[in-house]
Image (cartoon, rainbow, N blue to C red):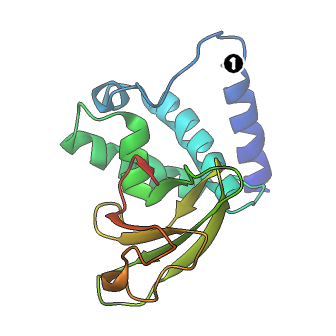
Amino acid sequence: MKSVAGAIWILVYLSQFAFAQQAIELETLACSQWTSLNPEAKLYLGAWLDGYSASLLQKLQIDFYRSSDIISKLSEKCQGSPAAPVATAYREAMGVAQFGCDASASDTCWFSVYPTATAPATVNFALAGSQRTLIRQVKIGNDLYCVCINGLPPSIYSQCQPVPGRWCKPASVSSNYNN
């Protein structure tokens, strides 16, 4: 019963923002602006970010405990980097990275993500040319990735290199665009 009442309260609370006619661009909103927001605005944005995260997992749910975790992690990250964009701080705090295939539409980019240069890949996926996706549970700045066009990456990162007839690129996972 508490969860239903809580959900109704949130919907009523959030409805007041529907008519505000104000857009918040998280790619340009600075962390210093996030830290100065009132708790209600942080709750609203935390719930939105939780829905964004849930969509990555293809779940149609909002978890208010996870929302408060997002707010806490984002606030902590923003305290240490006040000039950083909120979107970058969110991706770093929650381990979300954007990957894309910049190859032509007829090509396929094959990605593997590795925790170290000598460990086997923990995440493998493919994207068609010009396609982008978000990948969760990566360690921004620590994890490594290899992308190869029209061929599978090696099982170990240290072996990621171009071979005759196939282009491959090794790189570190960043909070920006990984291609």
* Image location of residue 62, percent across then percent down: 69, 52
| 90 horizontally vs 158: left or right | right
- The residue type indicated by label 1 comes to Gln
Report the residue marked by disc 1.
Answer: 16
Q: Is residue 25 visible?
A: yes
Q: Which quadrant holds the N terminus? A: bottom right
Residue found 67% across the figure and 28% down from its top: 13
Please tell me which residue lies in front, 52 or 135: 135
Question: In the drawing, does residue 125 fall left or right of residue 42?
Answer: right
The quadrant in which residue 170 appears is bottom left
Q: In terms of secondary structure, where does tag 1 sit?
A: loop
Q: Residue at x 58, y 52 (%)?
A: 103
Residue 63 in view (yes/no) = no
Classify 70 as above or below 25: below
Q: Position of residue 140 (x, y in %)?
A: 35, 61
Point out residue 143 in the picture as x, y percentages from the top left corner. 34, 71
Outermost residue to the front: 164
How many numbered marks appear?
1
